[in-house]
Structures are given as structure tokens and as C-alpha cells.
Amino acid sequence: MSNSNFSLLSGNEIHKALELHSLEPQLMMTDNIATIIALQITLFPSQGFCVGITTHHAILDGKSTTMFVKSWVYLCKKGNTKNSSLPPKLTLFYDRSVIKDPSGLDLVYLNQWLAFTSSDSDPNRRSLIILQNIKDVSDDLLRPTFDLTHEHIKSLREKVLSKLDKAKPLHLSSFVLTFAYVSTCLIKARGGESDKMVNLGFATDARSHLNPPIPKNYFGNCVLGLLASAKAGNFMDENGLPLLRSWQAIWLKSWRRKGFLNRQKRS
């Protein structure tokens, strides 16, 4: 139960980030055993309630978590119907053998993770415990919510296209535009030296991009990250948004080609 302002926390207004932490459940974890998911329902008397979800990312990704929530909602809508079954799109697919990894990237990543988490006293340490944040969240850290409407996206798209070579049209998805806009605003707000290198990246669902593609209802962790670097000054001038948009579009175009795992190299 919470006495916090439900409207404030669930709305777009600025509030302290720490106010949300009590709504987040904690996973029970040891080196050998870990829960996959934790749920917490918090009641705000006479206001509403919220459902907090924490997952172990080594087991399932965001899409799998979303499928779980959708399945939960579907069964709740069915009520107490006996032998209720899920529709095909929500019936989870568990077969790990469908993911082909000819380059042996699984061992590369596992060895890198082991090297990152081990210590001199225990070089072979294996643990299911999630790494904690290096720094505690400051009490004065604020959390706002920004609402980008269809009109905002349309305006951004028109602005970008007006400054690009019309002979080389590019598909501008809402994701690319939003990522470019937010990243540019973040870099400008932080300021600093214009020749400082900035790394930007994001995780993406790999299910439909593997060769062959795996089912959309695959339940597990199937994400890969895309990362690129550029000088901060490239995003601080008048043409910063088009530049970042073009940069991200190139990454997405490359990512959409099939057989992503086949093209990766061991390092």
C-alpha cells in the first residue's frame, strides 16, 4: 500500500525518481538459484493500483515479458473458464535449438561475462546474481515523461527530410526519429567538448532478423545490441538531427539484412 500521489506518478509531471523504487519488486537470487520474474501489486487507496514487474534478463527479454503480461491479461478476461487456452500468438515457444550460432558467439559472450564478473580470489566464479548499480540514485534526481504525438513525429520527419538529399530517400520510422531526437537533445543538454566521442546504442529484438527467422512467440532472451560512435559536435549544430537520423538509418538498414549471426566475427 502506498500513500503517494497516484496521479503524479502515473502522469507526465516531473517527480523524484526514488518515489518509484518502492513500487518495484526484488528478485530472490543466490549464486546458484534465481527467480525469473517478480510481481508486486501496490494499492493507492481511493486512487488506483499499479503492477510492478522485475525480470531476470539472462532468462527472458522485454518481448517475452510483454508476452507474459498479454497472456495474463487474456486469461483474466476469460474469467474462471475451465481449461482456458492461449491463442497461437501467445502460446510460448521454448525450443532453443532453433537459434543457429555458426560462429560460436555464445562461448565468446559467456567467457567475456565470466572475465567481467570474476575476481582474483575466485577467477572461475559463476553467479546468477544480477550486477547492482555502481552508484546509488541521488535524492534530487528527477524523472519526467515526454509525450511525442503523431503530430510531433510528423513535424520531425518533415524537418529531417527538408535537410536531406532528396535524390536519396530514406525510410524514417517513428523509432529512428524518436531515438535521434532524444539523443540529440541529451547531447546538447550535457554540453561539453565538441570533439568528445559519444557512444549511442540500443538493444533490438533479433527474432525476425536471424537466418532462418525464429517464431515471434519465442520465449527467452533473443536481443542484440547496435552501437555507433560520433563526435558530440556533430549533434550540436543546426543540422545535428538530420546527421544523427542518417547515422541511425544506416545502422538499421544494415541490421535488417538476414543472417546477422552468420556475419559476426569472433574477437
Image (spheres, grey):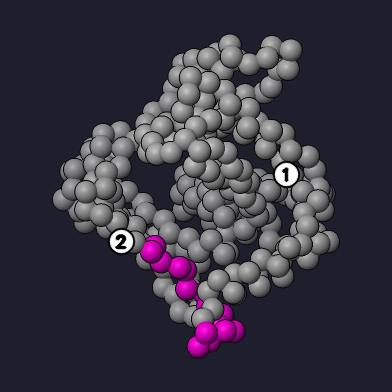
Residue at image location 76% in from the left, 62% down from the top: 266
What kind of residue is marked 2?
Asp
Residue 234 placement (x, y as % from top left): 53, 30
User: Would residue 210 be found to the left or right of residue 76 on screen?
Assistant: right
Whether residue 91 appears in this view of the structure is no
Which region of the structure is painted magenta? 120-134
Label disc, if present, on residue 208 of the rendered structure: 1
Above or below 94: residue 149 = above
Q: Quadrant of residue 109?
A: bottom right
100 magenta-colored: no
Residue 17 placement (x, y as % from top left): 28, 48
Which structural element holds mark 1?
helix
Along the line of sight, the residue nearer the viewer: 231 or 51 = 231
Above or below 224: residue 35 = below
Along the line of sight, the residue nearer the viewer: 234 or 74 = 234
Label disc, if present, on residue 136 of the rendered structure: 2
Along the line of sight, the residue nearer the viewer: 49 or 98 = 98
